[in-house]
Image (spheres, rainbow, N blue to C red):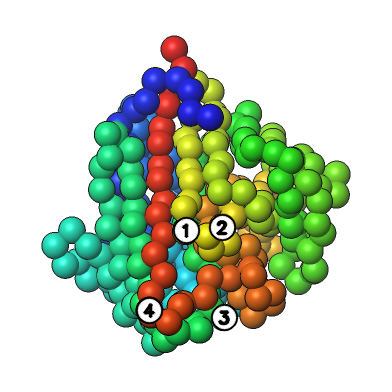
């Protein structure tokens, strides 16, 4: 449920660097977290992920190969009000527009019929330790304790003893989760960011990356990802038939991401 006064949302993207969202502001607040990562400006297709923060477009997978997908490491081009990128197996187009103060991003992926993929709006958010993540529940939640382990299935918001709706101070942990729900709200102080994904009957979810100083080994830092997703797994190669999007005979899949910001009085 969206409550509070709505704030106009402003988005800045960088087609030259993977279509990355470099800014997501509302009411004077920058929601996207950033970190200094010199490799980000020089990545090439097939490179390991260079985590500079912001929001990266991860498709056709998040984990697995290519690392964080094939689109984030390529130069996009702009055609009128549309950004697009050509990858070996697909073309992705994106149109971001204002809708009464909300940011709405419409996507189309074009590929051969039968092509299976997942997509995530890999948004790393600048949040305080007191921030709270809200998802209408109970919702089936798949917890991935670490990158090499299998998953544990439970019910939002607590899985395997971990309160996924709370952050708190750094505790040296890092876990990923996929919540089978189409909407998420992030509350931090008086401000709330609402994100939702619509995909006309295709599987959708919300991925979470809860890194409280537990990743990477040797040089850990804190980062929190709240990621609307098309599909329901991080790695498409490990997906069941109903856990990915599948390109139909018409040759394209469309979906929509909506971002709304509010503030309490």
Tag of residue 250? 4
Q: Is residue 63 visible?
A: no
| Residue to which mark 2 is pinned | 204
Dot 2 surroundings within 10 Å: few (below 14), some, or many (20 or more)? many
Residue 125: percent from the left, percent from the top? 50, 44
Residue 15: percent from the left, percent from the top? 27, 65
| Residue to which mark 1 is pinned | 199
Residue 37: percent from the left, percent from the top? 45, 61
Residue sitting at 73 percent across and 52 percent down? 141
Q: Quadrant of residue 111?
A: bottom left
Q: Quarter holding the C terminus?
A: top left
Residue 124 in the image: above or below residue 127: below
User: Nearest the camera: 259 or 182?
Assistant: 182
* Mark-to-mark CA distance, 1 and 4: 15 Å
| Residue to which mark 3 is pinned | 65
* Mark-to-mark CA distance, 2 and 4: 20 Å
């Amino acid at each position: 449920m969206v409550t509070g006064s709505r704030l106009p949302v402003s988005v800045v993207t960088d087609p030259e660097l993977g279509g990355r969202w470099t800014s997501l502001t509302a009411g004077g607040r920058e929601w996207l977290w950033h970190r200094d990562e010199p490799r980000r400006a020089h990545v090439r297709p097939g490179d390991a992920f260079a985590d500079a923060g912001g929001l990266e477009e991860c498709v056709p997978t998040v984990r697995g190969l290519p690392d964080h997908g094939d689109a984030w490491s390529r130069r996009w081009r702009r055609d009128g009000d549309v950004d697009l990128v050509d990858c070996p197996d697909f073309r992705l187009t994106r149109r971001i527009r204002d809708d009464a103060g909300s940011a709405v991003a419409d996507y189309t992926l074009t590929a051969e019929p039968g092509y299976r993929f997942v997509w995530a709006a890999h948004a790393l958010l600048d949040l305080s330790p007191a921030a709270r993540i809200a998802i209408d529940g109970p919702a089936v939640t798949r917890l991935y304790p670490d990158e090499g382990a299998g998953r544990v299935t439970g019910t939002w918001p607590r899985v395997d003893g971990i309160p996924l709706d709370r952050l708190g101070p750094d505790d040296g942990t890092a876990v990923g989760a996929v919540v089978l729900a189409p909407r998420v709200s992030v509350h931090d102080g008086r401000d709330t960011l609402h994100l939702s994904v619509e995909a006309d009957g295709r599987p959708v979810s919300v991925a979470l990356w809860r890194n409280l100083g537990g990743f990477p080994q040797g040089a850990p830092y804190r980062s929190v990802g709240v990621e609307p997703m098309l599909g329901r797994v991080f790695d498409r190669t490990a997906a069941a038939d109903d856990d990915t999007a599948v390109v139909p005979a018409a040759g394209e899949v469309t979906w929509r991401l909506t971002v709304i910001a509010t503030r309490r009085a």
